[in-house]
Image: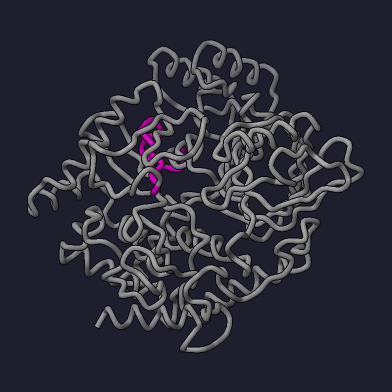
């Protein structure tokens, strides 16, 4: 019964995310463009009411230009169908193809930017073609940059070397694409998406780990998790005789302002106007326990080496910082009874527990609880105390058996799920110190590995992985000569190289081992 209720909750979330299709100018969404739409947008303009539907020309402002636009639609009888469902891009039944084209000068500039600062977030100019499901989007002048933390490297050659046309020493690297970097209009997006993270499978010979995790999060109702999909990637530098095929990449939805807007439009976040922080182990651990001695930074695209980086409302940085500090002080300073009341007011605790359960089930040791790393926090308002705060998971390639001696852990498969990380990381330890929350966390872990319906149970998990690998198998070989095969093993640097995803062994199949660990903690 408990699993059925959880499944119904997931289906309710999924239903809210179905495709939204409407006619531009149909402000009241009654599938007709008439005088009632003119009246509606006039009311929005006169009342100063925020309503994305009333921003007919989609310039970010609701004003007389939108009134004129609706009038023109009414008088002309023209109908322009608009699809606002970004899930089109993330359809795992499809395999998108992305072709990037860069001038020689811009590509050499990217190489020099890396040589000067290998943490650079600076963009170069590129053109992009995005092909999927019979549709082609030609997007000119997109921003292209390098991404990655410990995985960041030079995309070709060696320090100080310019591009070597037709004799290139290519390397797999992570890319970021910002279609609105240079030109901010609706011609520069793909079905409402205007940013993409493209990741090569650096630590995952199985070509599946991070996609599995993000899909599991979302299938289990954790709507804060990013969308993801496979893609095939090509790059052409002017002067080369042909495109370079870089192979199969992972395509991920970035956590940014557009991410917030999509979830606000889907009635998840109540607003997209709050403060978004990226939190990572950089100048120190992002443990939320040392509010006055951590590096707070306003994102300016210079580099990516700070513990807490504000991504939105940069102009109000000082206010956002004080809000963040106040949250941490209350996290540590409230009595047990006061904490229980406060955390229920400022946090969707059930969503947090679902996030935590999936996180632990997939073996994400490089997380907030164990390693004080790899998460975002979103405060839904700029008010110092009146807000909801959400933890947003990200960076899940080191999972599903890729294990490390880190934090309190030595084995991400067999580690006790109730002792996953540091007691001093208070957001987790204080929530789980409340008996009913701890019981719900254990319940969610059990549901994930349930023999009948659990999405982390061996039968269901391996069926999903086999299907995905079969889809990309023939496309993995690529022009870099790197990562040319799909192999069922964890990252080579891990401390438990015995783990496998598809071999049906109780001793070393990650799903079997994890199920045993969860069943053990539940007794």
- Name the residue nearer the viewer: 297 or 150: 150
Q: Is residue 267 magenta?
A: yes
**Which residue: 42% across, 53% down?**
393
Which of the 4 quarters of the picture holds residue 492? Answer: bottom right
Residue 392 in the image: above or below residue 115: below
> Does residue 334 appear to the left or right of 463 in the view shown?
left
Does residue 336 lie above or below 137 as drawn? below
Residue 329 percent across, percent down from the top left: 17, 41
In the rendered view, would you say 23 is above or below 13? above
Quarter of the image with the C terminus is bottom left
259 left or right of 295 in image = right
Say whether residue 158 is left or right of residue 152: right
Give the x, y percent position of residue 215.
Answer: 52, 61
The residue positioned farthest toward the right in the image shown = 241
Residue 246 coordinates in the image, percent (x, y): 75, 53
Residue 400 in view here: no
Q: Residue at x 50, y 63 (%)?
A: 398
Of 403 and 270, nearer the camera is 403
| Magenta stretch secondary structure, dominant | loop
Q: Quadrant of residue 433?
A: bottom left
Kindly indicate the quadrant of the structure image that contains residue 279: top left
Name the residue: 22% across, 66% down: 438
What segment is highlighted magenta in the picture? 265-281
Q: From where the camera sits, is residue 143 visible?
A: yes
265 or 231: which is nearer to us? 231
Q: How is the image coloured?
A: one colour
Q: Position of residue 337 (x, y in %)?
A: 7, 53
For image coordinates 74% across by 66% down, the residue present is 484
In the picture, the quarter occupied by the N terminus is bottom left
Q: Is residue 278 magenta?
A: yes
């Amino acid at each position: 019964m408990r699993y059925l209720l959880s499944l119904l909750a997931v289906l309710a979330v999924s239903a809210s995310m179905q495709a939204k299709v409407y006619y531009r100018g149909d402000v009241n969404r009654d599938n007709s463009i008439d005088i009632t739409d003119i009246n509606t947008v006039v009311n929005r303009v006169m009342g100063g009411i925020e309503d994305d539907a009333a921003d007919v020309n989609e310039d970010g402002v609701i004003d007389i230009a939108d009134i004129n636009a609706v009038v023109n639609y009414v008088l002309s009888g023209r109908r322009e169908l608009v699809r606002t469902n970004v899930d089109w891009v993330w359809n795992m039944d499809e395999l998108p193809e992305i072709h990037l084209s860069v001038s020689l000068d811009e590509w050499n500039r990217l190489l020099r930017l890396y040589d000067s600062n290998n943490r650079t977030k600076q963009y170069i100019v590129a053109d992009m073609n995005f092909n999927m499901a019979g549709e082609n989007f030609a997007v000119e002048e997109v921003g292209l940059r390098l991404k990655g933390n410990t995985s960041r490297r030079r995309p070709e050659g060696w320090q100080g070397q310019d591009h070597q046309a037709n004799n290139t020493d290519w390397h797999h690297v992570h890319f970021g694409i910002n279609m609105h970097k240079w030109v901010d209009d609706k011609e520069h997006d793909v079905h409402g998406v205007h940013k993409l993270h493209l990741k090569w499978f650096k630590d995952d010979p199985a070509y599946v780990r991070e996609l599995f995790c993000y899909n599991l999060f979302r299938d289990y109702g954790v709507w804060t998790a990013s969308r993801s999909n496979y893609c095939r990637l090509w790059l052409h530098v002017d002067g080369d005789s042909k495109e370079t095929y870089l192979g199969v990449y992972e395509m991920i939805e970035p956590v940014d302002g557009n991410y917030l807007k999509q979830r606000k439009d889907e009635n998840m976040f109540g607003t997209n106007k709050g403060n978004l922080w990226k939190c990572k182990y950089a100048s120190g651990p992002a443990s939320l326990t040392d509010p006055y001695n951590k590096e707070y930074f306003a994102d300016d695209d210079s580099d990516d080496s700070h513990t807490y980086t504000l991504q939105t409302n940069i102009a109000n940085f000082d206010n956002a910082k004080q809000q963040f500090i106040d949250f941490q002080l209350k996290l540590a300073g409230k009595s047990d009874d006061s904490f229980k009341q406060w955390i229920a007011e400022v946090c969707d605790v059930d969503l947090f527990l679902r996030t935590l359960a999936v996180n632990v089930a997939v073996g994400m040791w490089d997380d907030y609880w164990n390693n004080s790393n790899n998460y975002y926090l979103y405060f839904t308002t700029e008010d110092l105390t009146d807000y909801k705060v959400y933890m947003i998971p990200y960076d899940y390639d080191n999972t599903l058996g890729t294990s490390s001696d880190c934090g309190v852990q030595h084995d991400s498969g067999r580690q006790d799920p109730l002792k996953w990380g540091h007691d001093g990381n208070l957001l987790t330890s204080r929530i789980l110190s409340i008996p009913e929350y701890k019981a719900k966390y254990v319940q969610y872990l059990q549901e994930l590995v349930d023999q009948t319906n659990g999405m982390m149970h061996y039968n269901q998990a391996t069926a999903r992985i086999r299907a995905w690998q079969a889809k990309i198998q023939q496309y993995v070989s690529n022009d870099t000569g790197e990562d040319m095969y799909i192999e069922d093993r964890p990252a080579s640097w891990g401390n438990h190289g015995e783990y496998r995803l598809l071999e049906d062994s109780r001793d070393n199949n990650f799903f079997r081992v994890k199920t045993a660990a969860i069943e053990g903690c539940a007794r």
